[in-house]
């Protein structure tokens, strides 16, 4: 599963971050851009399993960020509703979010020259 | 006091996925059209035919063509195991290409998105059971190459090799002469050079201070062999690469 690879990366990164924290880690927060189309339940389960061994006693929470795109040709900025995408497109974007440039166009001018303003990435925050 | 540290987990993901391979060869050129993808495919096939598990990775998000050379379709079903397993094109030869996700189209990516796409494909590519990973880069020395070199230096320095491709054209050679010292500094490794599409009288064994590891002759039959590994195996270019593969991999 793709989620398993991401969960492993998240927990490895959290371990590194925890060492730089200076205090005892209490919470690992994972911010997931919705463009990743990740199954949050599956991701959470993998994180829980990996975290139990890597950072025992540390809680985790997952927060999501909706995708906002900007057209670099006409400047229009909009929130992309992931539910409007075809399942095959969602699957492609799930693996490679930049694949959206092949499928999503600016609703105003039709350009595929887009920038993802928010909602693409995954970030790990470790709270002390 | 609340203390919070934050970062992108993908570099850890890349480190994990690349830890599975024994060797990484980056194929590069600052000039376009010199045959990077062709040399990547020939080198991969030659190694695979020697019984070595080879993974090919195309990171040219604007114009991926590596899959065409080795005959992989645009639409494939990839197995999801700790990311995605590459598509198998031959007994020991596997490939992962952006076309498997984006289809047969150019992706108009600006700088940071090129970097994001690179990080993502390296994070999801599961190269277990692969011995040698060969990465086909787009032409130039921009965001993709600079990020890739930095990632490889920080996560896989000791097993990374670089192969610069040029034609005998003085324009291509000049371009390499300018850029190879920078590549060497960025990768902490002295790149090897392959002269591709060479005429029968090509002689030079050095490009600046960089050794020519091999010369691949111009071979008109290669164009017709695109997409068929069996036809590629019958080309002179394949024989030439087979003759230099040991010296490239051994260094």
Image: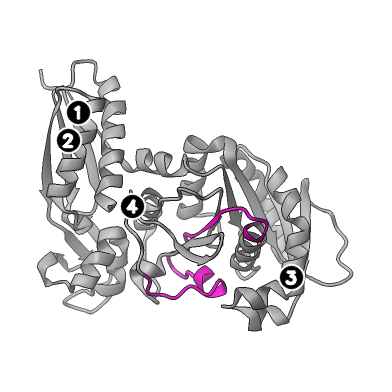
Instruction: Please say whether residue B71 is one of the residues in the magenta stretch.
Output: yes
Q: Are marks 4 and 1 on the same chain?
A: no
Please give the chain letter of the residue carrying mark 4.
Answer: B
Residue beneath disc 3: B237
Q: Which residue is mark 4?
A: B81
Neighbour tally class for label 4: few under 14, some 14-19, many 20 plus, Cα within 10 Å: some
Chain of the residue on which disc 1 is drawn: A
Q: Position of residue B235 (x, y in %)?
A: 73, 75
Q: CA distance from mark 2 to mark 4?
A: 18 Å
Do marks 2 and 4 share a chain? no
Q: Is residue A88 left or right of residue B1?
A: right
Disc 3 to disc 1: CB gap under 8 Å: no
Q: Is residue B18 left or right of residue B177?
A: left
The answer to which quarter of the image holds residue B167 is: bottom right
Q: Using the image, name the chain to which the residue with label 3 belongs.
A: B
Q: Which residue is mark 2?
A: A48
């Amino acid at each position: 599963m793709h989620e398993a690879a991401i969960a492993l990366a998240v927990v490895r990164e959290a371990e590194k971050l925890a060492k730089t924290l200076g205090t005892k880690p209490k919470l690992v927060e994972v911010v997931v851009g919705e463009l990743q189309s990740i199954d949050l339940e599956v991701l959470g389960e993998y994180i829980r399993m990996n975290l139990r061994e890597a950072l025992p006693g540390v809680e985790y929470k997952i927060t999501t960020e909706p995708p906002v795109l900007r057209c670099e040709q006409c400047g229009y900025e909009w929130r992309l509703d992931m539910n409007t995408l075809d399942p095959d497109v969602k699957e492609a974007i799930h693996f490679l979010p930049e694949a959206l440039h092949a499928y999503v166009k600016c609703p105003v001018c039709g350009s595929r020259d887009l920038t993802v303003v928010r909602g693409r990435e995954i970030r790990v925050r470790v709270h002390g | 006091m609340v203390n919070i540290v934050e970062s992108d987990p993908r570099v850890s993901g890349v480190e994990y996925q690349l830890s599975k391979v024994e060797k990484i060869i980056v194929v590069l050129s600052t000039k376009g059209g010199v045959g990077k993808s062709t040399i990547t495919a020939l080198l991969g096939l030659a190694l695979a035919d020697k019984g070595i598990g080879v993974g090919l990775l195309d990171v040219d998000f604007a114009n991926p063509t590596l899959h065409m050379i080795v005959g992989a379709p645009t639409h494939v079903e990839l197995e999801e195991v700790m990311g995605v397993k590459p598509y198998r094109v031959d007994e020991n030869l596997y490939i992962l290409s952006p076309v498997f996700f984006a289809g047969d189209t150019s992706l108009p990516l600006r700088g940071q998105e090129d970097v994001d796409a690179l990080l993502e494909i390296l994070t999801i590519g599961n190269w277990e059971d692969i011995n040698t990973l060969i990465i086909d880069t787009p032409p130039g020395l921009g965001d993709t190459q600079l990020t890739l070199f930095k990632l490889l230096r920080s996560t896989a320095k000791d097993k990374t090799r670089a192969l610069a491709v040029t034609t005998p054209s003085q324009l291509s050679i000049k371009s390499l002469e300018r850029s190879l010292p920078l590549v060497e500094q960025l990768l902490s490794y002295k790149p090897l050079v392959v002269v591709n599409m060479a005429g029968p009288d090509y002689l030079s064994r050095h490009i600046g201070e960089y050794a020519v590891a091999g010369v691949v002759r111009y071979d008109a039959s290669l164009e017709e062999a695109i997409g068929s590994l069996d036809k590629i195996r019958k080309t002179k270019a394949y024989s030439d690469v087979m003759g230099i593969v040991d010296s490239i991999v051994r260094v």
